[in-house]
Amino acid sequence: MKKVEIEKKEIDLAVQKIFPDGKIKTSEDLQATLAMLKETLTEAQTKKTELTAQLSAVTQSKQGDVAKVREEEKYQMQRAQKLALNGLIATVIAVNKEWGFVMVNAGRQHGVSPEASLLVKRGNSRIARLRIVNLEESSVIADLVDESLVKGIDVQPGDKVIFENVQ
């Protein structure tokens, strides 16, 4: 028993030497502190797990939001292109009366699509409608829509072309 008491005192002295601030004076104090630190560690690990789950949820939410923003940006870009096309005024640069087609100085690079509807104007009057036959980078070849041509007026180079009902 005396031997155990001596060993205990030696341990207590070693603890005091390592922890000179006096908070831990005995091996029991050391064991209590160890248990408390283990409990604190467990709580911290639990909190870390919760925060990691929250971070994951927020990251997924952010990815969804980023995808929505990109989709909206794409929509707005397409909308802006269509609005720009609605405001585009091109010019008839050549007319082939024999075959009934015209060439216009606007094409893909200006945002023209094969579905676009074209009106030919002279001054403030509409004189014809065109249907796109061939779409190039910087020009369009289009047929005159016969029933749309105003009687007594021929489409000529220099007539203005506007793009109608582009949505």
Image: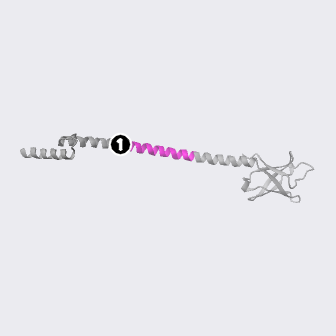
Q: Residue furthest right?
A: 152
Does residue 138 sit above or below 85 in this rendering? Answer: below
Q: Tell which of 84 and 100 is nearer to you.
A: 84
Residue 1: tell me if it is visible.
Answer: no
In the rendered structure, does residue 80 fall within the stretch colored magenta? no
Q: Quadrant of the N terminus?
A: top left
- Mark 1 is surrounded, within 10 Å at the Cα level, by few (under 14), some (14 to 19) or many (20 or more) other residues, namely few
Answer left or right for 63 relative to 143. Answer: left
Tell me where the magenta segment starts and ends, as one range. Answer: 45-68
Does residue 110 sit above or below 62 in this rendering? Answer: below
Q: Residue furthest front?
A: 20
Answer left or right for 45 relative to 125. Answer: left
Predominant secondary structure, magenta span? helix
Residue drawn 34% across the image and 42% down it: 44
Residue 114 at x, y percent in the picture: 74, 54
Q: Tell which of 145 and 120 is nearer to you.
A: 120
Identify residue for label 1: 46
Residue drawn 61% across the image and 45% down it: 72
Residue 55 at x, y percent in the picture: 44, 44
Q: Tell which of 116 and 160 is nearer to you.
A: 160
Residue 11 at x, y percent in the picture: 15, 46
Q: Residue 104 appears in which quarter of the rendering? A: bottom right
Q: Callout 1, which amino acid? A: Thr
Asked which secondary structure carries label 1, the reply is helix
Residue 43: tell me if it is visible.
Answer: yes
Answer left or right for 74 relative to 141. Answer: left
Q: Tell which of 156 and 44 is nearer to you.
A: 44
Residue 117 at x, y percent in the picture: 78, 49
Q: Quadrant of the C terminus?
A: top right
